[in-house]
Image (spheres, rainbow, N blue to C red):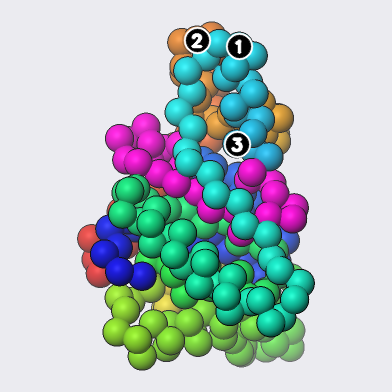
């Protein structure tokens, strides 16, 4: 990719259901509210959660005659024919390259399982954000913990994949990848499992080369707003006449903290 200007943020975890599309949408909106031009690329085109989210937003804006900021959307679906993969990657890289010259940030939402689009999204990234729920089972994608000795662990398949991506980027003279892991859909209740999860996450962060962003709690509001294409960042829009509860305000702050984590990583690399 030549003449790249945009900062490319890839939202990914080699596991479905981690809330990648919700984070993608909220990051896009908060960046746009800060005055940045943002494009989003839905590489999970078959499921199309992010694409549906934006379509819901467009419909809600038209139906209610409300002016909502909406990011530019590109939807990509995988090709089944293996012989077409390389050509498709070249086409995608060209699209991303063109977007990178027009926008300040590009947010890529990846498929929930590994394929050639998933892999290319990581090779394109400046910042990688990995949402993960507070479960020791889900933690296995980052580190396989020895149940008989909790201090022993080895790299999980996703952590190993990211390590390989980092080596690829270094070999091709590209900047170091900023990897951020964010606890998402975090239970509001304290538990032994939750405490162990965050202890392990902190312990392995330096070993595997990622930073930890403030967690995002499992809030019903995120699910409710999807159908309208709205985000918690829209709720103080005068046209919506919505009442902000303490839960909404806390959710907004969680998103702002995540956005600040990206800015912090950029300043330190």
Q: Regarding mark 3 in the picture, which secondary structure is present there?
A: helix
> Distance of mark 3 from mark 1, alpha carbons?
15 Å
Residue span colored magenta:
28-51
Residue at the disc numbered 3: 54
Residue at the disc numbered 1: 64
Q: Nearer the viewer, residue 57 or 78?
A: 78
| Label 2 crowd bin: few (<14), some (14–19), many (20+), radius 10 Å | few
> On the rendered image, what quadrant is the C terminus found in?
bottom left
Residue occupying the point 48% across, 82% down: 165
In the rendered view, would you say 262 is above or below 198? above
Residue occupying the point 54% across, 30% down: 232
**Image location of residue 89, percent across then percent down:** 55, 72
Kindly indicate the quadrant of the structure image that contains residue 267: bottom left
**Image location of residue 81, percent across then percent down:** 75, 76
> Distance of mark 2 from mark 3, alpha carbons?
19 Å
Q: Is residue 261 visible?
A: no
Residue occupying the point 30% across, 76% down: 175
Of tags 2 and 3, the one toward the viewer is 3
Residue at the disc numbered 2: 239
- Who comes first in sequence, dot 3 or dot 1? 3
**Image location of residue 93, percent across then percent down:** 46, 67
> On the rendered image, what quadrant is the N terminus found in?
bottom left
């Amino acid at each position: 990719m030549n003449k790249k200007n945009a900062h490319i943020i890839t939202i990914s975890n080699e596991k479905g259901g981690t809330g990648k599309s919700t984070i993608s949408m909220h990051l896009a909106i908060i960046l746009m509210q800060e005055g940045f031009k943002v494009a989003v690329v839905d590489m999970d085109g078959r499921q199309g959660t992010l694409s549906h989210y934006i379509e819901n937003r467009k419909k809600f804006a038209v139906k209610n005659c409300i002016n909502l900021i909406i990011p530019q959307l590109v939807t990509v679906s995988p090709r089944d024919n293996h012989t077409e993969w390389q050509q498709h990657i070249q086409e995608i890289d060209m699209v991303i390259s063109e977007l990178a010259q027009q926008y300040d940030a590009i947010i890529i939402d990846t498929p929930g399982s590994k394929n050639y689009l998933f892999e290319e999204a990581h090779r394109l990234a400046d910042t990688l954000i990995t949402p993960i729920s507070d479960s020791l089972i889900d933690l296995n994608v980052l580190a396989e913990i020895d149940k008989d000795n909790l201090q022993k662990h080895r790299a999980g398949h996703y952590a190993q994949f990211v390590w390989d991506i980092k080596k690829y980027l270094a070999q091709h003279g590209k900047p170091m990848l900023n990897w951020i892991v964010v606890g998402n859909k975090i239970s509001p209740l304290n538990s032994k499992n939750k405490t162990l999860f965050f202890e392990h996450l902190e312990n392995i962060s330096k070993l595997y080369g990622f930073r930890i962003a403030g967690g995002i709690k499992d809030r019903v509001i995120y699910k409710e707003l999807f159908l309208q294409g709205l985000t918690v960042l829209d709720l103080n829009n005068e046209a919506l006449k919505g009442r902000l509860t303490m839960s909404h305000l806390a959710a907004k702050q969680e998103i702002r903290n995540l956005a600040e984590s990206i800015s912090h990583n950029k300043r330190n690399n």
